[in-house]
Image (cartoon, helix red, strand yellow):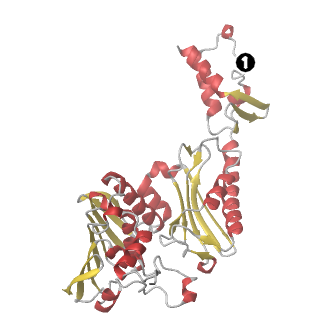
């Protein structure tokens, strides 16, 4: 008796869904990217219970006619590519034709869509990948509801985290999509309460400002570079603006949020000799590369990317940031006040000299000001350079001296 058998279609779909749909945020990502491909300028996301009970994404895009709407739930049905050549020249966010059938196989779906400018539309309801109801509707654009995610796969459902944790991942997903698509407005509702509203922005800088605020952006250096068909727009830490964590590090390739250790390393290398140990730069990298030279078809989530010229990308990112940081460093170190040059109290302190505690504090603050040329040496010393030579300051000892004199 043969041991090998073909699995039933519903089981195959659930297996495929396991690769595409990891958690509610995965659904949000796929639906937002579909809306972006539909040329939407406004996207609204509504979630309940961390997306476990409801995810609803509505857009004002081109919409679908009846025939396309019925086809979109078939596996590998897509309007994005036609042949193998297209697979290696992808310019849309989606292209695999797997997202909607995968989502539909593990949830209860209601799709309402209609071609923009048309009076007719269609409404489709599905449960666990099976069509339950199809009827006419009057709608322009697309609205899709995903209810009871993993209702038919309890083993998957039990691995979901708390509502707050799942919501955190959804907010992170919406933020990344919004950062890379400033021309699109985003609105996120959680438990029917407005959580995020981002109007259409004029560009990347304004979008980052909308998300993180003016003060945050004021601590970033803006740069652009172009070489060999590669383009980079970036916002990176100015000197002294380093963080305790990697929370604000983003890489986008052709508007897709990706993770790439090599590109991240190129950024850190650009700050070599400047950034203190255990501190991290902020960076928003927006890379544009010829689609033929980059492969997103590595994993169904498209979070991973394969570059044709990995070393070339590394050098391009590293040199673009390094050159800008070097220029900023020269500006950063140019001003040097006479008061700082003549000061020697950091190395020699004589209580009998009658120097006040406030005077020491003022001089130390002057030495720590970011307008002075300084360099961290390990975890102990700061080297401050001036016309009179190089001064080494033990910043731990200096701090202790201030505390001692104060108390």
| Place of residue 4 in the rendered image (x, y in percent of width and height, measured from the top left) | 46, 81
Residue in the image at 64% along x and 41% along y: 276
Viewer-nearest residue: 210 or 173: 173
Q: So how many labels did they put on this image?
A: 1
In this orientation, does residue 100 appear? no
Viewer-nearest residue: 258 or 333: 258
Q: Is residue 370 left or right of residue 130?
A: right
| Place of residue 144 in the rendered image (x, y in percent of width and height, measured from the top left) | 28, 75
Viewer-nearest residue: 397 or 50: 50
Residue in the image at 59% along x and 23% along y: 361
Q: Is residue 37 left or right of residue 263?
A: left
Residue in the image at 49% along x and 60% along y: 205
Q: Secondary structure at mark 1?
A: loop
Residue in the image at 28% along x and 69% along y: 152
Q: Residue furthest top?
A: 352
- Callout 1: 10 Å neighbours few (<14), some, many (20+)? few
Q: Is residue 315 left or right of residue 252?
A: right
Q: Is residue 314 left or right of residue 53?
A: right
Q: Is residue 334 above or below residue 68?
A: above
Mark 1 sits on what residue?
A: 348
| Place of residue 343 in the rendered image (x, y in percent of width and height, measured from the top left) | 71, 24
User: Which quadrant of the structure image shows residue 71?
Assistant: bottom left
User: Which quadrant of the structure image shows residue 103?
Assistant: bottom left
Viewer-nearest residue: 321 or 362: 321
């Amino acid at each position: 008796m043969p041991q090998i058998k073909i699995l039933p279609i519903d089981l195959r779909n659930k297996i495929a869904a396991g690769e595409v749909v990891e958690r509610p945020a995965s659904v949000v990502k796929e639906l937002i990217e579909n809306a972006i491909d539909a040329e939407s300028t406004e996207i609204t996301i509504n979630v309940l219970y961390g997306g476990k009970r409801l995810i609803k994404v509505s857009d004002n895009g081109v919409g679908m006619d009846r025939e396309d709407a019925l086809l979109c739930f078939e596996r590998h049905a897509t309007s994005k590519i036609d042949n193998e050549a297209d697979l290696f020249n992808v310019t849309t966010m989606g292209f695999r034709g797997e997202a909607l059938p995968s989502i539909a196989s593990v949830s209860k779906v209601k799709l309402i869509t209609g071609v923009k400018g048309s009076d007719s539309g269609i409404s489709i309801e599905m449960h666990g990948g099976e069509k339950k109801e199809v009827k006419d509707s009057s709608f322009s654009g697309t609205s899709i509801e995903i209810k009871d995610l993993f209702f038919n796969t309890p083993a998957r459902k039990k691995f979901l985290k708390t509502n707050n944790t799942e919501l955190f991942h959804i907010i992170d997903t919406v933020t990344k999509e919004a950062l890379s698509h400033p021309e699109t407005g985003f609105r996120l509702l959680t438990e029917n309460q407005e959580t995020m509203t981002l109007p259409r922005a004029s560009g990347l800088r304004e979008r980052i400002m909308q998300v993180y605020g003016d003060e945050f952006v004021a601590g970033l250096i803006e740069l652009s570079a172009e070489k060999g068909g590669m383009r980079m727009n970036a916002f990176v830490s100015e000197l002294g603006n380093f963080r305790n964590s990697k929370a604000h590090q983003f890489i986008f390739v052709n508007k897709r949020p990706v993770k790439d250790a090599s590109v991240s390393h190129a950024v850190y290398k650009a700050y070599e000799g400047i950034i203190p140990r255990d501190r991290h730069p902020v960076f928003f990298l927006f890379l544009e590369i010829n689609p033929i030279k980059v492969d997103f078809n590595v994993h169904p989530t498209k979070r991973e990317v394969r570059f044709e010229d990995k070393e070339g990308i590394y050098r391009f990112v590293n040199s673009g940031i390094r050159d800008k940081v070097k220029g900023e460093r020269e500006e950063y170190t140019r001003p040097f006040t006479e008061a700082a040059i003549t000061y020697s109290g950091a190395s020699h302190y004589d209580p009998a000299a009658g120097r006040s505690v406030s005077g020491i504090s003022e001089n130390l603050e002057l030495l720590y000001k970011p307008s002075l040329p300084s360099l961290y040496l390990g975890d102990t010393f700061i080297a401050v350079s001036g016309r009179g030579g190089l001064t080494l300051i033990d910043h731990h000892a200096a701090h202790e001296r201030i505390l001692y004199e104060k108390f």
